[in-house]
Amino acid sequence: MIGRLAIAGLGPGDAALITPEVTQALAEATDIVGYIPYVRRVPDRPGLNRHETDNREELDRARHALALAADGRRVVVVSSGDPGVFAMAAAVFEAVEKGPAVWRDLDIHVLPGITAMLAAAARAGAPLGHDFCAINLSDNLKPWALIETRLRLAVEADFAIALYNPRSTARPEGFGLALALLRTTCAPSRVIIFARAVSTPEERLRVVRLADAAPDMADMQTVVLIGSSATRIIDRSGAPFVYTPRSAP
Amino acid sequence: MIGRLAIAGLGPGDAALITPEVTQALAEATDIVGYIPYVRRVPDRPGLNRHETDNREELDRARHALALAADGRRVVVVSSGDPGVFAMAAAVFEAVEKGPAVWRDLDIHVLPGITAMLAAAARAGAPLGHDFCAINLSDNLKPWALIETRLRLAVEADFAIALYNPRSTARPEGFGLALALLRTTCAPSRVIIFARAVSTPEERLRVVRLADAAPDMADMQTVVLIGSSATRIIDRSGAPFVYTPRSAP
């Protein structure tokens, strides 16, 4: 029997943001593979094998999942957010390319999910309503100089910018360096949104101007959205709305 | 009674990609507002008012929805994909900012959805598995020169690039110009994915190299994904997998 491998996005946290497609794949799985807190979001049931692994072992985890699928099992690799955005899908395909030929012919599907920047943007209004980019600030897998180059070019292009993993364990000072770079190229009034653990009980949303942004406003569970030069704040009695107009001059 | 306005993402087409949060909002709505084909994706029921509008009237549509909410109704504005990505959310907040003060205090929520580029990426593998950007090629609301500048800078940053609305009605030649620009700056082997109507019966996915890409491979229902310089194709017996490695040199 040929096994199956689905790489599924659990969204940002709230079960109401998990697609029915993912829910069905989880219900049909024999094996769930993933980083500990994501595997624990899947309800246990008889006959389900849950394989919890540490965060730093993405390629090993991918190989383990592929070996299980090649063995005829119905495997779901779980990611938070969307598996294709700084998550497990790229690791699985890297393992496929480097692995035994038989892995290429497995039934492998990626099941999309609500990624952190879009959940965060939705909470704030529409800060990514015009052209935008997504940059992973973690330099585990790329040199810091490349991150700086991309940030500079993204500002020059006047994209709104989503920063994932602003506080990497390996380089906690990364986000501070990014803020310093932004201060040399953007107006102090540039809008910045710190969106922490959106849709979970620990959610916190903070809208500030670049002049008031500080490195410790971001932690490992935060995605940071930097507005384009056109991004606007609408003040009101509750939390402000933030949006980037659809039109550009 | 204070009304409510939700701006909801219906995802790319398949009902299995609509979040439970959106399904619930649709079930509780008194009024659905949106572009004709999106409104028609919402099942009719007694007591539900469906307001279908043409595609070119986003700001009018937003004002209409806000006026209904201010009148105490439970309104859902529907977008395909994610409402915050080149869709209705930015138009609603623009209307709020320019409209009567009372609109600012309405209960307005954006309900995220699976946006076209992430559905397309999931079908192909993990082409957006590293840093990436999203550019709307429609120049209805911005000058073409700005689009070219952003494309150039995105290539220089070596982002993977998602192009929305590659064939705008106003300027059908836009995507051909974009391809010509890419040919001056990228290797002929650069990977390009044409993803049409993903998750619908009309879905078609095509993976080519830049050398073989042609303007008529994209239409109004296509999102185009351009790999970074590192994006790889894994050949196999079925459709190839495409992924962008997590690490950069």
Image (cartoon, coloured by chain):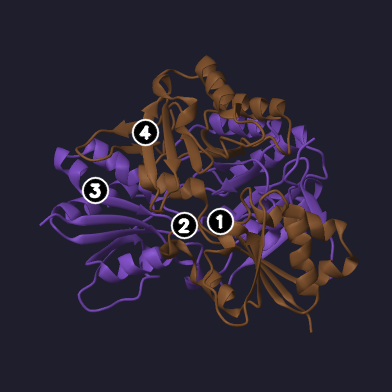
Chain colours: A purple, B brown
Q: Looking at the picture, does residue A42 appear above or below residue B185?
A: below
- Spatial CA span between label 1 and label 2: 8 Å
| Residue drawn at (60%, 28%) of the image | B174
Q: Are marks 1 and 2 in contact (CB under 8 Å)?
A: yes
| Residue drawn at (27%, 78%) of the image | A45
User: Where does residue A182 sit, x and y in percent of width and height?
Assistant: 72, 37
Residue B47 quadrant = bottom right
Viewer-side label of 2, 3 = 2
- Spatial CA span between label 2 and label 3: 32 Å
Sequence-wise, the earlier of marks 1 and 4 is 1
The amino acid type found where label 4 is placed reads Val
Q: Are marks 1 and 4 in contact (CB under 8 Å)?
A: no
Q: Which mark is residue A63?
A: 3
Residue ID for mark 4: B207
Left or right placement of residue B219 versus residue B150 in this view:
left
Left or right placement of residue B164 versus residue B76 in this view:
left
- Spatial CA span between label 1 and label 3: 35 Å
Category of crowding for the residue at label 1, using alpha-carbon neighbours closer than 10 angstroms: few (below 14), some (14–19), many (at least 20): many
| Residue drawn at (31%, 42%) of the image | A93
- Spatial CA span between label 4 and label 3: 26 Å
